[in-house]
Image: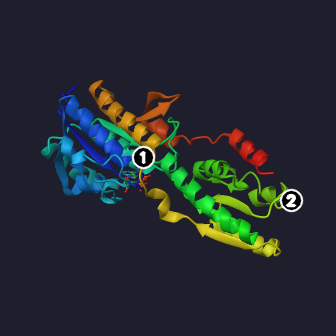
Amino acid sequence: MAKINCIGILTSGGDAPGMNAAIRAVTRTAIYNGLSVKGIYRGYKGLVTGEIKEFKSQNVSNIIQQGGTILKTARCKEFTTPEGRKIAYDNMKAEGIDALVVIGGDGSLTGARIFAEEYDVPCIGLPGTIDNDLYGTDTTIGYDTALNTILDAVDKIRDTATSHERLFFVEVMGRDAGFLALNGAIASGAEAAIIPEFSTDVDQLEDFIKNGFRKSKNSSIVLVAESELTGGAMHYAERVKKEYPEYDVRVTILGHLQRGGSPSAHDRILASRLGAAAIDAIMEGQRNVMIGVHHDEIVYVPFSKAIKNDKPIKKELVNVLRALSI
Ligand code: ADP
C-alpha cells in the first residue's frame, strides 16, 4: 500500500456543532504523528475548485468551543457526477493529498464511498450530523448539543404554554429520524413525540389524544420531527384545529437555531476521540470506514453499513415517554 504522508480534511452537508473540534483533533493527531494536513474548503466543492490550504497546528487553535465549521460546508452537485469527481481527484493528487477525512452525514459519506471505490483513495468518515441517523455509532457529532438546544427552547415554550393553557406543536429537525424529537420529548418532559419511524404504524395524534391528553394537565407540548413522513408540526396543528376545535393550539418551528451554538462537553469529547481515531485508522491501513463509538469503544463501520442501514429507534424510549407523560 502506498505510504500516506498528507491528509485532506473537509466538512460537508449539514453543519453540526462539534465539527470544529473534529477538525482540530484530526489536524493535531496527524501532525503529532508526523503527517501533514490540508484543509479543503466548502466540502466537496473545494476539492473540485481547488480551495485547499495547508493546515498547521495554529490553524485549529481556539476553535474547539466554536459551533459551525471553520472549513465551511456546502452541497456540491458536481461531485455527484463522474466528471466532477475526476476533477476532484486530479486536484487532490496535484495537492499531494494521499487520504481524505470527510466529516458529514449520510450524503457526505455516500459521496466518500463512491469516490473511494472509483479512485482507490483511502477515505475515512466521521459522523457529523445533529440527526444521529448514522448506523453503527451510538451517537453522532452535534446530536447532544442540538438536543440541549431543543431542551432550552422547550423549557421556555412550557412557561407560555402553561400560562395560556395551550397545546404546542414544536417542530424539531431530524429528516427521517426521530432521535431529536423522541429524546428531546423525554428530556423536556413533553407529552408526546411524533416521529417518522412510526408514521405508518399508528395515527400518532389519535394515540396521543387517547392516552390522556389534558386529563390532568393545563398545557401540552408535542415534539414533531420535521419530515415528509410526519408532515411536520403545521400538519398536526391544522388537524387538531379541525378535529378538536376546543383546544387552543400553537406551533413553533425551531429551525436552524438547532444547528448552532457552542458544542456540549459530550460533543467536544466525542469529536476529539473520533478525530484522533480517524488518523489511527489511516495509519493502521483502514480505509472506507466510518469511525463510530459503540459501548464507549471506538469502532470502524464500513461505509456500506453506516449509510444503507436505518438506525433503529428504541421502543423502550417510546414507552418511557408514554409512562412519564400521564
Ligand atoms: P449530509 O452529509 O448532511 O447528509 P447531503 O446529503 O446534502 O448532506 O450531502 C452532502 C454532499 O455530499 C452533496 O452535496 C454531494 O456533494 C455529496 N453527495 C451526496 N450524495 C452523493 C452521491 N450519491 N454521490 C456523490 N456525492 C454525493
Q: Which residue occupies 22% across, 25% down?
A: 1
- Callout 2 amino acid: Lys
Q: Which residue occupies 52% across, 55% down?
A: 149
Query: Is any atom of residue 236 visible in this view?
Result: no
Where 199 falls versus 5 (above or below)?
A: below
Q: Which mark is residue 76?
A: none
Where 202 falls versus 102 (above or below)?
A: below
Q: Quadrant of residue 8?
A: top left
* Residue 128 in picture, x, y percent from top left: 42, 46
Count all numbered tags in the image, as a single digit: 2
> What residue sits right under mark 1 in the picture?
128
Q: Which residue occupies 25% across, 39% down?
A: 27
> What residue sits right under mark 2 in the picture?
215
Instruction: Name the residue nearer the viewer: 137 or 160.
Output: 160
Q: Which residue occupies 17% across, 32% down?
A: 5
- Callout 1 amino acid: Gly
* Residue 16 in picture, x, y percent from top left: 42, 52
Where 117 falls versus 185 (above or below)?
A: above
* Residue 61 in picture, x, y percent from top left: 25, 46
Which numbered disc, 2 or 1, marks the residue that appears first in the sequence?
A: 1
Query: Is any atom of residue 267 visible in this view?
Result: yes
Judged from the image, the secondary structure of the residue bearing numbered disc 2 is loop
Judged from the image, the secondary structure of the residue bearing numbered disc 1 is loop
Crowding near the residue tagged with mark 1, few <14, some 14–19, many ≥20 C-alpha atoms within 10 Å:
many
Between tags 2 and 1, which lies in front?
A: 2
| Relative horizontal placement of residue 202, taking residue 57 as reference (left or right) | right
Rounded to the nearest whole Å, what is the CA distance between mark 2 and mark 1?
41 Å
Cβ at disc 2 under 8 Å from ligand 1: no
Where 167 falls versus 150 (above or below)?
A: below
Crowding near the residue tagged with mark 2, few <14, some 14–19, many ≥20 C-alpha atoms within 10 Å:
few
Cβ at disc 1 under 8 Å from ligand 1: yes
Answer yes or no: do the residues labelled 2 and 1 have beta carbons within 8 Å?
no
